[in-house]
Amino acid sequence: MASNQTHRLHEGGFVDRSQPLEFKFDGKSYSGFSGDTLASALVANGVRLVGRSFKYHRPRGILTAGSEEPNALVELRTGARKEANTRMTVTELYDGLEANSQNRWPSLKHDFLAVNQLASPIFVAGFYYKTFMWPAKFWEGLYEPLIRRAAGLGDTAKQPDPDHYEKAWAHCDVLIAGAGPAGISAALAAGRAGARVILAEEDFAVGGRLLADGGEINGKPAAEWLTGAMAEIASMDNVRVMTRSAVFGVYDGGTYGVIERVNDHLPVPPAHQPRHRLWRVVAKRCVVAMGAIERPVVFGNNDRPGVMMASAVRSYIGRYGATPGKRIAVFTNNNDGWKTVDIAQAAGVEIAAVVDARNDLPPELLARGKDGNFSVLNGQVSSADGGRDGITKVRIALNGGAKAEVDADCLAVSGGWNPGVGLTCNHRGKPEWREDIAAFVPGNCPEGMTVAGAANGYFSLKDCLSGGHKAGTEAAKAAGASGKPGTAAKASAEQYVQTPLWHVAGKGKSFVDQQHDVTASDVELANREGFQSVEHLKRYTTLGMATDQGKTSNISGLAIMAEVSGRSIPETGTTMYRPPYVPVSIGALAGHHRDEEFHAIRLTPSHHWAEEQGAVFVDTGLWKRAQWFPRPGEKDWLESVNREVLTVRNGVGFCDVTTLGKIDVMGSDAGAFLDRVYINTFSKLAVGKARYGLMLREDGIVMDDGTTSRLSEDHYFMTTTTAKAGPVMQHLEYCRQVLWPELDVQLTSASEQWAQFSIAGPKTREVLKAVLDPSEDVSNDAFPFMGAREVKLRDADITCRLFRISFSGELAFEISVPCAYGDAMARNLMKAGEPHGIIPYGTEALGVMRIEKGHAAGNELNGMTTAGDLGLGGMMAKKKDYIGRVMAQREELVSPDRMVMVGIKPVNNLDKLDAGGHVIPKGAKPGPDTDEGYVTSVCFSPMLDQYLGLGMVARGRDRIGEIMSVCDPLRGKTYDCEICSPVFYDPEGGRQRG
Amino acid sequence: MRINCPYCGERDASEFTYLGDASLVRPNATPKDPPLDPTSDEAQALRDQFYDYVYLRDNVAGFMQESWYHGGGCRTWLTVERHTVTHEIKSVTAAPGVGASAPRKTGRGR
Amino acid sequence: MAKLQWNETAPLQSVAEARRHGVADGDAGVTAGEIRGFQLVLLLARRGQADAMRKTAKTQFGADPGNEPRAVSGKNGCTMIWSGPDQFYALTPIAKAKPVAQLQAKFAKSASISDQSNGRSLIKVSGPNARDCLCKMLSVDLHPEVFANGDAVSTQMAHMAVNVWRDKDGAFNIMVFTSFAESLWRAILDHGAEFGMEIEEPKQLS
């Protein structure tokens, strides 16, 4: 045994003394054992001061031995893996662990900001709210920075987290939360009955209080039963035990959140393993067996190191073989606190005194002092004395008025037990008050949930075992398992007797919420100032709002509020319980989906070819699209884009447009169906023809546009914009399934089958001829504008679809090839087009050319514009019904004052236009009253050698030629622009029809 | 939340997209011949019907018929009878035109 | 001009090659590979013609596809995978497949047919830890009593739409949109790495 483990017992507990582990706390080296937590190892080393408090920087020690710990928070690990506010009571010790105390400067022992204690009157409840009322400039400049430095907890790592995290799904018949005696008992019963069971335990060891308190089960030591039960469970294929896994939330429909801390017990997770894994467990039934949390009694200086929950004292002695004190005083209001005496004495630890607050203290307890050589005092601890290193003395107000003192270095406090009702209240459930145990117990639980053991308010080992067995049996049966659950294990039924005690007036601050430094007088102040509702109390004082979510403080806080406001505790009520019950890392919530994998990525068939070409890619929804293809020597993107535009306009270029949505619309009523979803008519479109279509939402606003071709009598091929492919598909399915089930229409996405390329420019035909079978005639006569039909490729038996459509305004075709040939198509276009100077072009050049041609795109189809606004009102058919027809006729939507799409050209052709600028009358003062429109899209047009834009301008079509101002307050610019036709280039459209 | 798709079985809510009230019926908007004068009362009445259909919703605290789309599964539009406070689901049925179901005039478009 | 080369490119052409991935020691817990060389057509029954479609499927593909979430084996190596009410995929080794036009003629009255042979990537995942790997991406219950050999689901995997079925050997066949293939592949590799993965040489569907 390492010599510095001054408080390690020679034997006992579940630590492995043959496996010493070295660790550092605040830079100092210590040793502990395998099976320790950081807290138990520090206890074993006699370290009592472990942190400074949030507001007052008071010295703090370890209060509990579990997940509910408010004080003993550390920065665990260093560098990029540093994790702030980590509870050392649930931090498994590993060799080389490094932890630092937080919220102190320069050191834990000499904390400069401990002077805050002297300034404590300004830190009272409601301090923030009251401070906010001071002059704002004082707040921003002075108080906030000061408070930020003074208050707060640990410091986070500044580097990206190098570990990875995962999410996963699990399904079972019965999920059991907690593997103490009740949970294990439930797992045995449900498992034997044949149900699929998940037994989830937050701790790294199963057994719950059995590990600390021992006892006898089936006439044998509890540890023996535990070993046997776990062996039986391990033999059942249908039961899965998950340790280090806390159930943190209950969601609708039997879905539970479980956070598995897969590798927090290792310095670095093994290669390919996550640090945490977030489980979504879908369970038919759930048994909550999460035990109870011991509650403190609030008294003077009750936050001093050395004051500890009695159950925690037993955990350190019984489970970890380490004692928190050499001379322990016990303060209790119930008989369970007396267990501490048994366990400490059995381990050879001296008991100084037992202070029992109950007036009706049974004589046999009074008599125990004589046998055990300690004093039994009938009274209440009023305060603890001692400096920052911990208590030395306990002051007692004896029942009857006298005072007493006891020398002790540890005070074990038990104010009784609060069942762990958190999960049971996740669906707005309200816990119920049970007078006999003076505690809230589960009330209306979420569907499918039952509660067993201490979590249900039945604390004896017998009740835990039988309650767990019953809950497991019933849950398995309800989930459809029909096997035999066997019988429950047996134990004696010790009585839990208590007399409520919440607060003892005494010298020194009395803390309710130790993590947020909320005192009993803060609760009293909240009452005086009218914040008596528990929800107000919580927000006004911040009681229960810290990282521990008030697990040791909420009930005490509301009990004190009840006392001072003259109401009963159930009248006072509890605050809402929301997930998560324990902290869940953000990494676990994100899982796999971070950095490059933040979302799924879609690649076009020519993506890898474009990479070879050095393309710059842009994210378009989930897609990666080639934005431009830089060439050596080009100084910026604009030079590349200008070259691409000019090459297309004067020669030929091609662009991968696979990302457009493509939908096969099939069936005998396909044409009639399209007539109802588009504003224009498709039923009369000839086979072999394409048509531009526009669809509205039912409110009359434009939803999407695209070109739809008729491939055969009952087969149309629709294209949508890239962004709206999914929503349009969903909309069409709604129309088909919900609105018009009488129509014979079948829909499916064909987006992924076809690689689509736009080939554009005056030399397009030459290139096409070189890649198509020589029998294909693409002359203007044989393949006129808006033609659409199948063609064969040169040197291969591959059928493609060719469409004569143009977005660029040039002579252009779009060719669809089966995706497997998309890469080959790009390469062959380059090869076949080489004599004609072909280039690939990206989305930027595509955008420039569509603006030059005045084609509306996403920026103009922005959810606010009508067909009329876009200059497409003439397409709206008069003699048929279609989605949006009626609402599009509303007065405001047909008003002549509407903003409509126009072209916008800076008067000074050297001015740069930016999208987002507001259009106002020339010379007007910018403001909401003078705002008459906005710029939607801009580009530099190499054809016109200046910036151009599209925009929406009120009465725009009547204002062609008017000079207006564009005001761009974001960029601090205002300049004059001419309103013009949106079609800047080739307004007659001769080029695309040639 | 879990929704029991009549075709796929019970699935996580993340597979579904919510639309809203499933009891709405789209008014018949077939144009008259000759077309209505847009300023006529009849035209205004039709616009009022559509105004209800597009915008006016009951804010139900209780069971409600809702349209959900199983886009992350079989692409069926479903009518889900769901309690808006407790999220309890009483029934899930498919839209009248699901799959190849026989042609019928029971859709919510008139 | 020189002859044009029309080389086929599989969805995972540039990433799926035989190798060991993830944990290097011991037996691989997960085996994964791309399946190529198939014809895939989606059949959607015409209004009121679901029974007629199934009847024609029996003669054309050798079995009744049913209308349950199942993957049914037919003749010529064809598997019919349910993908929604009254619709199914027919997956056939390319060498044994009938031309799509011929199928369209046979199903003219009963079903619309959409050729998706290039629209999906097919990935096969198997091995003792296949379920442990896939449960990190699939929200459906993969327990063999719930998702047995021959069962199929239309669902999402790492937020991507997929069709998944278990074949007669219990392997998981995953069909995803071509454009998502590399993204899904990376997700599978990331989630399978801890079990040690064997990446197989891409195979032709047989």
Image (cartoon, rainbow, N blue to C red):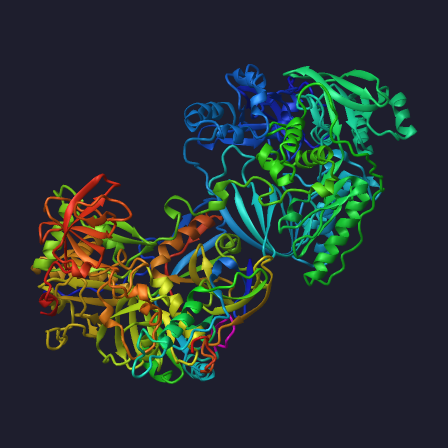
Instruction: State whether residue A726 is above or below residue A214.
Output: below
Image quadrant holding the C terminus of chain A, namely bottom left
Quadrant of the image occupied by residue A840: bottom left
Image quadrant holding the N terminus of chain A, namely top right
- Please give the name of the residue rendered at 41% of the width and 81% of the height, measured from the top-left corner: C60
Quadrant of the image occupied by residue C122: bottom left
- Please give the name of the residue rendered at 27% of the width and 61% of the height, measured from the top-left corner: A658
Q: In the image, is A606 to the left or to the right of A54?
A: left
For the residue pair A151 and A411, the one nearer the viewer reads as: A151
Residue C77 in view = no
Magenta segment: does it hold A344?
A: no
- Secondary structure, magenta segment, majority class: loop
Question: Total marks drawn?
Answer: 0
Q: Position of residue A777 (x, y in %)?
A: 12, 75
For the residue pair A87 and A53, the one nearer the viewer reads as: A53
Q: In the image, is B91 to the left or to the right of A291?
A: left
Q: Position of residue C80 (x, y in %)?
A: 45, 73
Q: Position of residue A133 (x, y in %)?
A: 49, 30
Q: Which residues are magenta?
A: C65-74
For the residue pair A75 and B94, the one nearer the viewer reads as: B94
- Please give the name of the residue rendered at 26% of the width and 77% of the height, measured from the top-left corner: A711
Q: In the image, is A239 to the left or to the right of C58?
A: right
For the residue pair A908 and C204, the one nearer the viewer reads as: A908
Residue A814 in view = yes
Q: Position of residue A853 (x, y in %)?
A: 15, 60
Instruction: State whether residue A605 is above or below residue A368.
Output: below
